[in-house]
């Protein structure tokens, strides 16, 4: 059975005045269940679903995103592709911060990345394990159901320099008691239950991700990378959404997918693909194609084929324009990004804007004809591009 939806848990974190300062995001598998077999896979899946598909604008906006993070992921450079002012990486009490992980936390902290202790404790074993990284922690989260509140009054408080968050708060008196102890932030059913966000999945094929990742490990030119992406429309869609979520400056005013890739850079692109690889690890569904991905690739392929049929001596610029038009139309239809927002961010050429908005010009006719073909109207598509010598028989073939 194929599952064409992704699921992501979200719960707000509030200050004492009930203002939302951020959201914690929770892993959910393709069935909507919270079953974690591999923490690295869970973290990567949350980031991919959040940034590549849902988008930061609709999921946490201008607030913080709290993400549970495992040790092995900290040993990669993936975090470097994420903006340090938007994320807080939570360190589970089950994590084993060995010397390499401690060095990684120290390094990322020096760059301005932010960390929180999840399910912090006064237990001596916890202190022994986590005390070395205390200087690099901004937030400490305490489960009110697992914490003896008197410990904050009777013992020296090693968390005094951290911002304290009481989680699993279920009634007002609990919030009041922890606020009296200096807790600034709160999370729990008293404020809001964890809400599961459900969106369409638009996943690339795992083998395609691996192919481009392997290509990047070689000494290849940007032309070779762009050629590889040209055949992988789903990856282009996800990369655009990722950059829109974390580095909007990289897509502002771009005129092609190539320019988007050039701005991001080969090294960052490799780390982003590594995140995709980790997000699929341990699953059996990595080679499935869902209907949304098939539809998206079909639109890109159809528009490209129509261009080649109309203009056998097409230019590289025309092919790039066709891919950009297809991508923008899919971002609006599949990822729910309003076209006016996309056009405002990109400032495309008048030819591309006319093609998308009014379906005029050769590119616009190709786009309009593709929409007709998707609805099964071959004659309608043929009428739109009749002036270019295309017949219904041409389209049927």
Image (tube, rainbow, N blue to C red):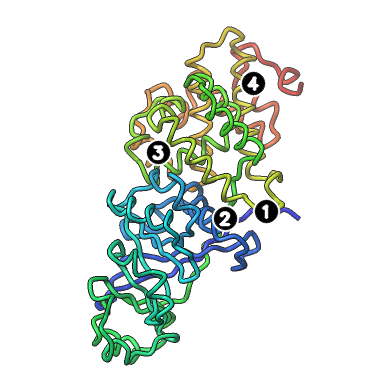
In the image, residue 311 sits, relative to residue 219, either above or below, namely above
Res 1 label: none
User: Quick check: 324 left or right of 161?
Assistant: right
Q: Earlier in the sequence, mark 3 or mark 1?
A: 1
Question: Where is mark 1, residue-wise?
Answer: 283
Foreground label between 3 and 2 = 2
Separation of marks 1 and 2 at Cα, in angstroms: 9 Å
Q: Quadrant of residue 98?
A: bottom left
Q: For the C terminus, which image quadrant?
A: top right
Separation of marks 4 and 1 at Cα, in angstroms: 34 Å
Separation of marks 3 and 4 at Cα, in angstroms: 25 Å
Foreground label between 4 and 1 = 1
Q: For the N terminus, which image quadrant?
A: bottom right
Determine the secondary structure under disc 4.
Answer: helix
Q: Earlier in the sequence, mark 4 or mark 2?
A: 2
Question: Where is mark 3, residue-wise?
Answer: 342
Question: Where is mark 4, residue-wise?
Answer: 305
Residue at image position (47%, 40%) is 271
Where is residue 321 drawn, in percent x and y? 48, 22
Q: Quadrant of residue 42?
A: bottom right
Foreground label between 4 and 2 = 2
Q: Earlier in the sequence, mark 1 or mark 2?
A: 2
Q: Earlier in the sequence, mark 3 or mark 4?
A: 4
Determine the secondary structure under disc 1.
Answer: loop
Where is residue 312 drawn, in percent x and y? 61, 9
Q: Quadrant of residue 242?
A: top left
Whether pointer 1 and pointer 2 mark residues with C-beta atoms closer than 8 Å, the reply is: yes
Q: Name the residue nearer the viewer: 205 or 113.
A: 113
Question: Where is mark 2, residue-wise?
Answer: 41
Q: Earlier in the sequence, mark 4 or mark 1?
A: 1
């Amino acid at each position: 059975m194929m599952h064409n939806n992704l699921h992501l848990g979200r719960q707000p974190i509030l200050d004492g005045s009930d203002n939302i300062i951020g959201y914690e995001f929770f892993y959910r598998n393709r069935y909507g269940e919270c079953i974690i077999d591999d923490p690295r896979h869970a973290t990567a899946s949350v980031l991919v679903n959040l940034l590549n598909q849902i988008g930061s604008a609709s999921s946490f906006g201008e607030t913080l995103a709290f993400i549970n993070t495992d040790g092995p992921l900290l040993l990669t450079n993936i975090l470097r592709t994420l903006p340090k002012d938007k994320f807080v990486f939570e360190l589970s009490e089950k994590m084993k911060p060995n010397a390499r992980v401690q060095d990684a936390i120290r390094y990322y902290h020096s760059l301005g990345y932010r960390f929180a202790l999840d399910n912090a404790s006064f237990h001596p074993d916890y202190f022994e394990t986590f005390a070395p990284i205390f200087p690099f922690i901004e937030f400490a989260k305490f489960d009110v159901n697992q914490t003896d509140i008197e410990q904050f009054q009777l013992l020296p408080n090693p968390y005094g320099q951290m911002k304290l968050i009481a989680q699993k708060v279920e009634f007002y008196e609990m919030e009041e008691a922890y606020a009296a102890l200096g807790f600034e932030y709160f999370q729990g059913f008293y404020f809001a239950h964890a809400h599961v966000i459900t969106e369409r999945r638009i996943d690339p094929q795992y083998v395609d991700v691996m192919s481009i990742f392997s290509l990047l490990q070689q000494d290849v030119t940007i032309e070779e990378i762009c050629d590889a992406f040209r055949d992988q429309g789903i990856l282009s869609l996800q990369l655009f959404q990722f950059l829109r979520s974390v580095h909007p400056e990289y897509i502002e005013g771009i005129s092609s997918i190539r320019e988007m890739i050039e701005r991001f850079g080969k090294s960052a692109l490799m780390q982003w693909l590594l995140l995709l690889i980790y997000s699929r690890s341990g699953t059996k569904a990595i080679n499935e194609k869902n209907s949304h991905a098939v539809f998206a690739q079909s639109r890109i392929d159809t528009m490209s084929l129509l261009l080649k049929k109309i203009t056998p001596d097409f230019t590289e610029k025309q092919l790039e324009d066709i891919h950009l038009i297809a991508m923008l139309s899919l971002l609006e239809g599949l990822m729910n990004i309003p076209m006016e927002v996309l056009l405002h961010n990109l400032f495309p050429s008048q030819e591309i804007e006319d093609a998308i908005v009014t379906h005029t010009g050769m590119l616009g006719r190709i786009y309009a004809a593709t929409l007709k073909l998707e609805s099964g109207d071959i004659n309608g598509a043929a009428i739109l591009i009749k002036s270019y010598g295309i017949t219904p028989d041409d389209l049927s073939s």
